[in-house]
Amino acid sequence: MVRGMASPPLLTEPVPDYGSAIGMHRLVRRIVARNPGPMTCHGTSTWIVGERHVAVIDPGPDDPAHRRALLAALAGEVVTHVLVTHGHHDHSAGAAGFAAAVGAAVYGFGRPEAARTVSVGAGHPPFLPDQSLADGEAIAGPGWTLTAIHTPGHASDHLCFALDGEGVLFSGDHVMGWSTSMVSPPDGDMGAYIASLRRLLGRSETVYLPGHGPAINDPRGHTEALLAHRLAREAAILAALRAGNASAAAIVPTLYPGLAEPLVRAAARSVLAHLLKLEADGVAERLQGPEEAFRAVN
């Protein structure tokens, strides 16, 4: 989630009232976890869908205070499904504890080996759902149906969830308004991310509710801007290769002048994802040596 130059217009919102359930739609409430940071905006959004018999999307980090807030907001209601957009710990680490507290199963997109490897390397447990959801699979409760849409790129196991008939898409970290999405290999894949953006452009939802930050009320325009941004970034990286800048570390200062130090590593991961896509497209190739360096093929 790197704010690079020439990014799409970014959306802002006030710091939320942590622990409070905020109505976002007649069937949707939002509770924000208190885990703010450069990769999470004000914190992770947990979504409650339905009334009385509900689904909960992204229980968030393993934070007892956030779990208590969720349970308080759900007093007197039955949680039928716990859904996770993807296995990154700020979305999934609290899922098992919350699901145990409410007596529900955790649903997610299978158990991709790459995601497990990345999770272990990142120092937190891998995300292993109780029930696997396939692309296009629907789950339902009284008055609501959610359909899973596999949108790999930010993570190989990333799902968006469409609230059928309501024009609402829970877009996780795939499309956000406050920032562009981080794509970090090996589990992050830029080619898959761009294809997933194009897939969403073929849909008709009128509002996106992302995993961090404010709602997106012009999802088509915003997604088109994200796609244009990624394609422009790809062209700039290819131009840098042709100029002789071969590694992600060498390219970052050119593409992200003045970037704050805490975000430099994240920017380098994003550039590497673009380089790997250019390699897969046959317009760049990896050079021999210990550094992940590339050159333009033509």
Image (cartoon, grey):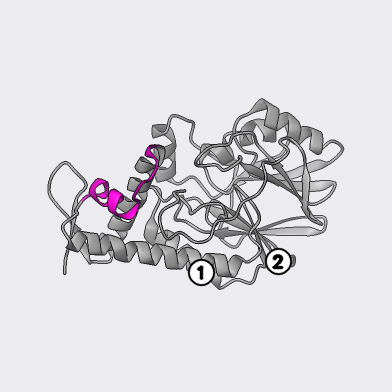
Quadrant of the rendered image containing residue 218 = bottom right
Q: Is residue 31 left or right of residue 3?
A: right
User: To which residue does mark 1 refer?
Assistant: 224
User: To which residue does mark 2 refer?
Assistant: 167
- Of residues 160 and 230, the one nearer the viewer is 230
Kind of residue indicated by mark 2: Gly
Residue at left offset 25%, top offset 63%:
238
Give the label on residue 243, or none.
Answer: none
Residue stretch rendered in magenta on the structure = 247-261
Kind of residue indicated by mark 1: Glu
Q: SS class of the residue under badge 1?
A: helix
Q: Is residue 282 magenta?
A: no
> How far across and how far down the image is residue 289, in percent?
13, 44
Q: SS class of the residue under badge 2?
A: loop
Any part of residue 174 in sight: yes
Within 10 Å of the Cα at label 2, are there few (<14), some (14-19), or many (20+) other Cα atoms?
few
Residue at left offset 59%, top offset 47%:
212
